[in-house]
Amino acid sequence: MTAGQHGISIIGYGGMGSQHARLLTGLGANLVSGIWDIDRNKRTAAEAAGLNVYSSFMEALNDPLADLVLIATPNHLHKEMAIQAMQAGKHVICEKPVTLNSRELEEILEAAGQYGRLFVVHQNRRWDEDYLTIKKIYDERLLGEVFHLETRVQGSRGIPGDWRKEPEFGGGMMLDWGVHLIDRLLLMIGERVKQVYCTCTYVTGEQVDDGFRLLLTFESGKTALVEVGTSHFITLPKWYMCGNAGTAVIEDWEMNGRLVRLRTREGNDAKPIAAGAGLTKTMAPRNDETIEELELPAVKASILDFYRNVFDTLEGKAEILVKNSEVLRVMKVMEAAFESDRVRQAVPFE
Ligand SMILES: NC(=O)c1ccc[n+]([C@@H]2O[C@H](COP(=O)([O-])OP(=O)(O)OC[C@H]3O[C@@H](n4cnc5c(N)ncnc54)[C@H](O)[C@@H]3O)[C@@H](O)[C@H]2O)c1
């Protein structure tokens, strides 16, 4: 079987559903079996893009040409739709955040077991080049022993759209962006999370968080700051990673950044410098004799590999890359983060 022998019904043809349709059509001419969206305008747009449009959700679920259903509706609909699709015999690709909480995901996983279907979450930001570059630096120990890292996204436009502002739709930035940043971090560090401390922000006055600052402490003692903000007119680096032999930074989406690391621990005869109203030797900058600056070891990637992995898994040729146990763990970290915000204290985790 090849990609050409699979068919996918896409549910929800908004921002993300239409992006899936574009990518999948590029991957295989007949991969998209059809589209269902509750909004007539979206269905008209899908037709205009040359796509087959169903007349109901049930028609989408019963399309014999589709073996997969891709759910790209607002977050609160994922659980029911996923379970119905698997009950109808389809495998499911579901948008993130998979559900509103871990309990809902457990219900889905039970149904996947009961109906013997593949259920996989579109954690597409595992294929972001900034993440893969930082991961390479981490995996290859280019900074020595990493003791702290920071991962963040910041904008200044508040929470976008309509449903993302509403608690009952699964709105808020923890579920929207936190789910990506935490997922990648846990995957990269591969250690137990011992403690979670989080403060959510409500700067824009919505009922859901418009950002948060989350500090995770891992088993080895290393810490990670995960930060999302929507009222930041000057942004901090997307990634900042500190090891005992160097520091790496990725500033922005354009992959501007650098890596500075020790050449040698010899010759570190720092002299005091004038600093503000005093002197400092501890904080004196280094000279080029003991450090070197390197370009980031940029890693290229294609999100099409996400879909290819799903097809290969269905054909028994690969193991699924986005594992449900990983997704469930991320949901639980987010729940611990909300709990920490509520009680204004760090909470123990694993
Ligand atoms: N992985 C990513 O990078 C990424 C990016 C954006 C959004 N998302 C996720 O994708 C999902 C959709 O987000 P979006 O930004 O496309 O939202 P959107 O509002 O642009 O689109 C949602 C679509 O779902 C349709 N819809 C609503 N109720 C429906 C129903 N009962 N049946 C059929 N269609 C229905 C709406 O009419 C709309 O067209 C969310 O879960 C979101 O978190 C993921």
Image (cartoon, grey):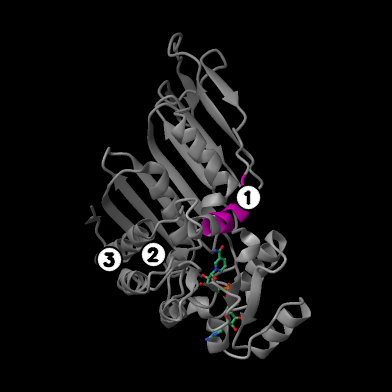
Mark 1 lies within 8 Å of ligand 1 (Cβ measured): no
**Which amino acid, by three-letter code, is at mark 3?**
Glu
Res 294 quadrant in image: top right
Q: Is residue 232 above or below residue 292?
A: below
Judged from the image, the quadrant occupied by ligand 1 is: bottom right
**Which amino acid, by three-letter code, is at mark 2?**
Cys
Which structural element holds mark 1?
Answer: loop
Identify the residue at horizontal 46%, vertical 14% (top origin).
Answer: 271
- The answer to the question of whether label 3 and label 1 lie on touching residues, with beta carbons closer than 8 A, is no
Foreground residue, 285 or 54? Answer: 54
Report which residue position mark 3 lands on.
339
Identify the residue at horizontal 35%, vertical 51% (top origin).
Answer: 215
Identify the residue at horizontal 54%, vertical 84% (top origin).
Answer: 62
Res 189 quadrant in image: top left
Foreground residue, 129 or 82? Answer: 82
User: Which numbered disc, 1 or 2, marks the residue closer to the eye?
Assistant: 1
Q: Which mark is residue 302?
A: 1
Q: Would you say residue 303 is visible in this rendering?
A: no
Residue 243 coordinates in the image, percent (x, y): 42, 30
Report which residue position mark 2 lands on.
200
Alpha carbon separation for disc pair 1 and 2: 33 Å
